[in-house]
Image: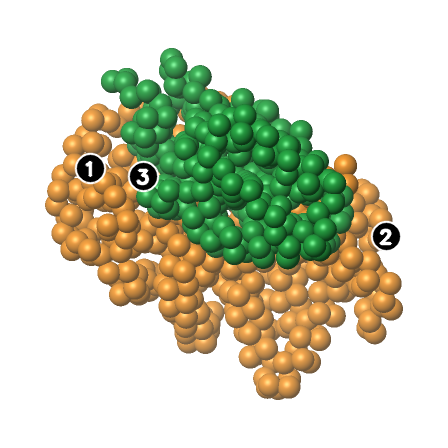
Chain colours: A orange, B green
């Protein structure tokens, strides 16, 4: 019995640390300039960050704890908490996770493989360029993890056809896997539907009355950044992971034979692509009126109604705990704004950074880009935006530009295994090491930040 | 009787698998080979699972499946399993049950071994595995870091055999550490079984910090001697005055398999103060079997 208690305590130490931190902070006096509700909101945010990073308890439990604490600390009533929990952003996250399952289940990966190989040929650098470009362009519309899930088999099959032992072609293996992961991650900035965090930020802008950003407006500002990043990323990856073979003719030939066995494109696959096109058009034209999330759910309904996917498959592969967590994170983000906590933190950050510079624009850039790009490597991009969004939006300046730069910076998740779903997916292959992420990731981060800053200061002002 | 053998990769687990399977065979035990891989962060688990389902359609499986395939082939090569024409290993026969994946093996394979894949914290997953089945001994590799083997020794409900610095070409002796702990009697029987089946000579060692060897110590030593004589195992006996842990380590060197009973101290005392088996495990440069009193 005692042993089980000791074991429980060692396994749950971060829960105990989080609760201890919350208790200690709660007992301290409320800082000047902050309401009690605002202070309690900040306490919930800090303790929740520890629980999300270290996962001592299941994520749905963390999500529920956030909601419970809001009521127990007197920050909001139960009905207020409930209404802030569900929003169009949460619908979008739910819808996009289910759309991912629906799209991946259509077995379009073989078509994709054939298409890429037919264009790129058998030279390794062209295959890598093809992977990065295709992953980036696709993920800008259908989400990074969907594309990674479809492209991983293609990449790993090429590796397997090159050598039965991937360790003998470690450079090529890393190059292919990181092309897929980083290409997909980069692409998610291109449109709002590229990632749930984009929709969260759009939701904050609208909810806080600070502006509106349509699907096409987002693309106007973000897509050129993506198009410039693609060739730079290809060069960085090629420079970092030198492949053992510069020509993969044998592997490409075997891959072509393998995918040719899947036969002609089917009616279901054409229908599935058609449904997605409808969803995309819905996002572009209908979302200003009915929201991105509702359009995503309409897409899911169409896939189910047409029998293109089974509910059991959607249910099994949709992580409902993640949806709950993001609902709770957005809920606490709204409380950060409503209680004045976000404004207090924003003012204190600007004041703190005045030690370095009195330039408020610099402080704003620092938080919206550098802090976001750093935090996203540990906390997940959507959670980073959910937490930092209300703060950066209270730092003044052009709210839409600040929102956009924060959301884009949250995609610079290249440095760690847990930085993004794409990083985690390629790590699950067992073929890449944590040090590989640092090797390429720091260069990708520097490049991405540089390109973003260039656009913020030179091109966006010209675009109006 | 069932043993659990934890593997991590072909590179690091070869000697653990070879020697561990020989030890299991000496007891006539069934063997469960368990691979515990890192668990994807829960935030991304659903998306990783989606990617894995897609990979499986291309016959690209979880890396743990390849480790289990290697372990299965190695057990056939080493003679633990009967080598037949029927391969028996089919990744499509991995069945999800009770938070783990278990391979359904055909015929006699299924009676001799289990192949199990788990994901998560290794201590947590092996504890869960031990709660699923009645394992007598858990066999693990010697990790470079102190913590894993130490935590497994502390928290697993089975006896634990840690394969530290195993050399398959070395001819080992058994260092049977005898004292007045309640598990000593069982440790003696385990040690004798291994010695007899694997033809290892035994050194029975009793160490006291003082010149006096109390009735508990001398009684246990006498019982150990009688048991080994009855088993007709090649043996010698030593009584040493000194620090027990340092004496065990100096005597064992690299060419002994240390066998000792688990400590009789309470769980709290062991957690805060440690125990002789834990300290011996930390310092040993050879395999060590800590036997629980059950």
Front-most of residues B182 and A240: B182
Position of residue A33 in the picture relative to residue B159 (left or right) = right
Q: Which residue is mark 3?
A: A153
First in residue order: circle 3 vs circle 2: 2
Position of residue A453 in the picture relative to residue B85 (left or right) = right
Give the x, y percent position of residue B231.
51, 26
Look at the picture and state if A2 lies above or below A32: above
Give the x, y percent position of residue A160.
24, 41
Front-most of residues B286 and A198: B286
Dot 1 and dot 3 within a common chain: yes
Q: Is any part of residue A278 visible from this angle?
A: no
Subunit of label 3: A
Residue drawn at the location 58% of the way across and 34% of the way down: B225
How many marks the image carries: the answer is 3
Q: Of tags 3 and 2, which is closer to the observer?
A: 3
Q: Secondary structure at mark 1?
A: helix
Residue drawn at the location 41% of the way across and 33% of the way down: B199
Give the x, y percent position of residue A430.
39, 45
Real-space Cα separation, disc 3 to disc 2, in angstroms? 50 Å
Residue drawn at the location 53% of the way across and 34% of the way down: B191
Front-most of residues B259 and A335: B259
First in residue order: circle 1 vs circle 3: 3
Disc 1 crowd, CA 10 A, few/some/many (<14, 14-19, 20+): many
Q: Which residue is mark 1?
A: A255
Subunit of label 2: A
Q: Quadrant of residue B84?
A: top left
Q: Quadrant of residue A44?
A: bottom right
Residue drawn at the location 74% of the way across and 70% of the way down: A344
Look at the picture and state if A438 lies above or below B247: below
Q: Secondary structure at mark 3?
A: helix
Labelled disc at residue A74: 2
Q: Secondary structure at mark 2?
A: loop
């Amino acid at each position: 019995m005692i042993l089980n208690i000791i074991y429980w305590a060692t396994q749950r130490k971060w829960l105990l640390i989080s609760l201890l931190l919350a208790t200690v902070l709660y007992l301290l006096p409320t800082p000047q300039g902050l309401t009690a509700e605002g202070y309690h909101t900040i306490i919930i945010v800090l303790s929740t960050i520890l629980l999300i990073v270290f996962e001592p308890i299941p994520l749905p439990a963390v999500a529920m704890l956030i909601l419970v604490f809001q009521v127990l600390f007197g920050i909001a009533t139960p009905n207020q908490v409930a209404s802030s929990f569900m929003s169009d952003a949460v619908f979008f996250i739910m819808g996009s996770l289910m759309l991912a399952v629906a799209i991946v289940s259509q077995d379009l990966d073989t078509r994709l493989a054939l298409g890429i190989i037919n264009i790129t040929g058998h030279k390794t650098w062209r295959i890598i360029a093809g992977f990065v470009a295709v992953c980036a362009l696709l993920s800008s519309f259908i989400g990074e993890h969907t594309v990674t899930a479809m492209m991983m088999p293609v990449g790993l099959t090429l590796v397997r056809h090159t050598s039965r032992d991937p360790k003998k072609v470690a450079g090529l293996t890393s190059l292919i896997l990181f092309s897929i992961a980083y290409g997909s991650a980069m692409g998610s900035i291109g449109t709002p539907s590229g990632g749930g965090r984009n929709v969260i930020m759009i939701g904050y802008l609208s909810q806080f009355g600070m502006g509106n950003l349509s699907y096409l407006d987002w693309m106007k500002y973000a897509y050129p950044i993506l198009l410039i990043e693609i060739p730079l990323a290809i060069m960085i990856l090629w420079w970092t992971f030198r492949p053992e073979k510069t020509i993969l003719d044998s592997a490409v030939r075997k891959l072509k034979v393998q995918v040719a066995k899947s036969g002609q494109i089917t009616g279901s696959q054409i229908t599935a692509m058609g449904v997605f096109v409808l969803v995309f058009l819905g996002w572009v034209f209908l979302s200003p009126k009915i929201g991105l999330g509702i359009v995503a759910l309409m897409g899911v309904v169409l896939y189910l109604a047409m029998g293109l996917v089974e509910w059991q498959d959607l249910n099994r592969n949709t992580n409902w705990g993640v949806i709950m967590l993001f609902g709770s994170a957005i809920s606490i983000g709204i409380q950060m704004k409503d209680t004045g906590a976000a404004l207090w933190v924003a003012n204190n950050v600007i004041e703190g950074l005045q030690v370095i510079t009195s330039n408020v624009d610099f402080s704003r850039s620092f938080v919206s880009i550098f802090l976001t790009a750093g935090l996203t490597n540990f906390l997940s991009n959507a959670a980073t935006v959910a937490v930092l969004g209300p703060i950066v939006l209270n730092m003044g300046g052009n709210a839409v530009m600040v929102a956009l730069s924060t959301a884009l910076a949250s995609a610079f998740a290249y440095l760690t295994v847990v930085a993004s779903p794409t990083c985690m997916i390629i790590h699950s292959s067992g073929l890449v090491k944590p040090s590989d992420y640092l090797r390429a990731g720091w260069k990708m981060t520097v490049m991405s930040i540089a390109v973003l800053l260039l656009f913020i200061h030179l091109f966006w002002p010209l675009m109006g | 009787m069932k043993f659990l053998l934890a593997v991590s990769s072909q590179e690091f687990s070869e000697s653990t698998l070879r020697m561990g399977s020989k030890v299991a065979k000496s007891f006539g035990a069934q063997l469960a080979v368990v691979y515990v891989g890192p668990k994807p962060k829960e935030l991304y688990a659903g998306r990783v699972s989606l990617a894995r389902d897609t990979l499986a359609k291309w016959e690209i499986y979880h890396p743990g499946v390849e480790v289990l395939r290697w372990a299965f082939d190695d057990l056939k090569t080493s003679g633990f399993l009967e080598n037949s024409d029927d391969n028996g290993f089919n990744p499509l026969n991995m069945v999800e049950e009770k938070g783990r994946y278990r391979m359904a093996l055909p015929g006699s394979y299924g009676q001799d071994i289990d192949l199990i894949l788990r994901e998560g914290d290794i201590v947590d997953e092996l504890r869960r595995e031990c709660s699923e089945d009645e394992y007598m001994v858990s066999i693990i590799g010697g990790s470079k870091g102190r913590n894993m083997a130490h935590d497994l020794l502390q928290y697993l409900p089975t006896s634990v055999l840690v394969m530290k610095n195993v050399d398959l070409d070395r001819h080992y002796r058994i260092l049977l550490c005898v004292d007045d702990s309640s598990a000593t009697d069982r440790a003696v029987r385990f040690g004798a079984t291994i010695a007899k089946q694997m033809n290892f000579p035994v050194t029975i060692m009793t160490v006291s910090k003082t010149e006096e060897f109390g009735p508990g110590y001398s009684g246990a030593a006498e019982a150990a001697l009688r048991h080994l004589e009855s088993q007709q195992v090649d043996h010698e006996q030593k009584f040493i005055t000194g620090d027990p842990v340092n004496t065990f380590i100096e005597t064992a060197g690299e060419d002994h398999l240390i066998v000792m009973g688990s400590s009789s101290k309470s769980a709290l005392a062991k957690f805060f103060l440690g125990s002789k088996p834990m300290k011996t495990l930390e310092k040993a440069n050879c395999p060590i079997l800590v036997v629980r009193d059950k």
